[in-house]
Image: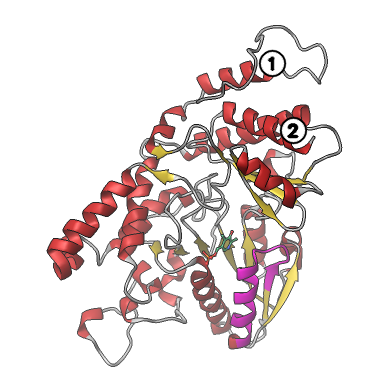
Amino acid sequence: MSDTSDAPDTPDTPTPDTSDTSDLAARAARLDAADELAFVRDRFVLDDDVVYLDGNSLGALPRAVPGRLAEVVEHEWGRLGIRSWEESGWWTAPERIGDRIAPLVGAGPGQVVVGDSTSVNVFKALVGAVRIAHADGPGRDEILVDAGTFPTDGYIAGSAARLTGCRVRAVPADRIAAEAGPRTAVALVNHVDFRTGRLYDLPGITAAVRAAGALAVWDLCHSAGALPVELAAHGVDFAVGCTYKFLNGGPGAPAYLYVRPGLQRWFDSPLPGWNSHAEPFAMAADYAPAEGAPRGRVGTPDILSMLALEAALGVWDGVRIEAVRAKSLALTDFFLECVARYVPAGLVESLTPDAHAERGSQVSLRCAEAEKAMPELIRRGVVGDVRRPDVLRFGFTPLYTSFAEVRRAARVIGEVLS
Ligand SMILES: *Cc1c(COP(=O)(O)O)cnc(C)c1O
């Protein structure tokens, strides 16, 4: 990694005071030398002059993707044409790639299907879950939504509620366990808050929601690929997530839907397109749902994006998600420490929890000058993003972010804000 803009550090001298940051480069070097995931960075196309801390919005490009996409376009589409639906495995790609994502979210084969956007999958999951809740009889007329939710989830929940005779009640995510009650049909929760990076207690909230007789729907957009998610172990009913953040699938890559095995046969999709039919090529007038994961399909899959995602998932070969989590926490700890050392006191305030159990893989810094500072950070090679009005957001992708980069980013933030 090129990080040559500093004067040489003196590694092993103890730091006399906190304004002396000379030990940080040596610390970063030691952490990088001990990093068991360091080899994965080469699987990505990255510019060593840029510290890319926006993988929580759009993951970096995996090296295998351009070649694979060219092959799909030139050979599978260009030469084989229509035959590729069978011969190149296009038709079964949504389930095959779902099975590739499953181990990253603690699901088994046949439980995850890839397709459509997260927004569309939130709709399928919510309406499907309310229909299951209503099959037990009336009385459950409330969809609980995490009050800090990513906006699309809240908007879709509102529409799902109007369609199913429910109303939406927004409560803070850490209150959902306490608020779920006899009127709750479904609770929709974001695993990690996109603004603050706070990680919520998936096992505890799921258990409480289910104990109240309701169903738990989780949005994993900011957790899958950054930390272990144990959907099956904790009895999550439905889960959705996108693949263009920590899964690096590319802009607009298709999302995924998980349905708990015990619920699959009760899942009545509100978007029963022909791809989810038990016999799609019978072209029957009447609808009969497929069994298992394909029931979550809708229409013809977006093959180019889907196969780009499949190639992108190759970066996970030989990577343990536990190692990813350990490095993610080490990166965010080190970043917070470097920010405290390089940024003059009072200019930023971390919104991200100190406790590891409550931290995702991003750090959000409240900063009065956020909107002015980010373009300057980007100009100086530190790419994050802003959540208005005053949050600087930095995502840490353990597969390719180094500790040296973390230190450099904090130093540049200090320079820009001073
Ligand atoms: C990124 C994100 C989405 C995105 O939804 P799309 O339909 O893919 O645009 C939804 N929910 C959460 C929590 C997100 O972080």
Q: Residue at x 61, y 22 (%)?
A: 5
* Rendered view: 40 above or below 121: above
| Label 1 packing within 10 angstroms: few (<14), some (14-19), many (20+) | some
Q: Which residue is mark 1?
A: 23
Circle nearer the N terminus (2, 1): 1
Numbered range of the magenta stretch: 144-162
Label 1 SS: helix
Label 2 SS: helix
Q: Are marks 2 and 1 in contact (CB under 8 Å)?
A: no
Residue 247: % across, % down? 46, 50
Question: Is 270 on the left or on the right of 187, as rendered?
Answer: left
Please say whether residue 364 is one of the residues in the magenta stretch: no
Q: Which one is in front, 271 or 243?
A: 243
* Rendered view: 283 above or below 241: below
**Residue 408 lies in what quarter of the image?**
top right
**Marking on residue 414:** 2
Q: Amino acid at mark 2?
A: Gly
Question: Is 158 on the left or on the right of 46, as rendered?
Answer: right
Q: Residue at x 33, y 53 (%)?
A: 310
**Residue 18 lies in what quarter of the image?**
top right
Residue 235: % across, % down? 54, 59
Q: Is residue 6 visible?
A: yes
Q: Residue furthest bottom?
A: 285
Q: Is residue 213 visible?
A: no
Q: Residue furthest right?
A: 346
* Rendered view: 354 above or below 243: above
Q: Which one is in front, 342 or 117?
A: 342
Q: Amino acid at mark 1?
A: Asp
Q: Residue furthest top?
A: 13
Q: Main secondary structure of the magenta part?
A: helix
Please say whether residue 152 is one of the residues in the magenta stretch: yes
Q: Which one is in front, 367 or 217?
A: 367
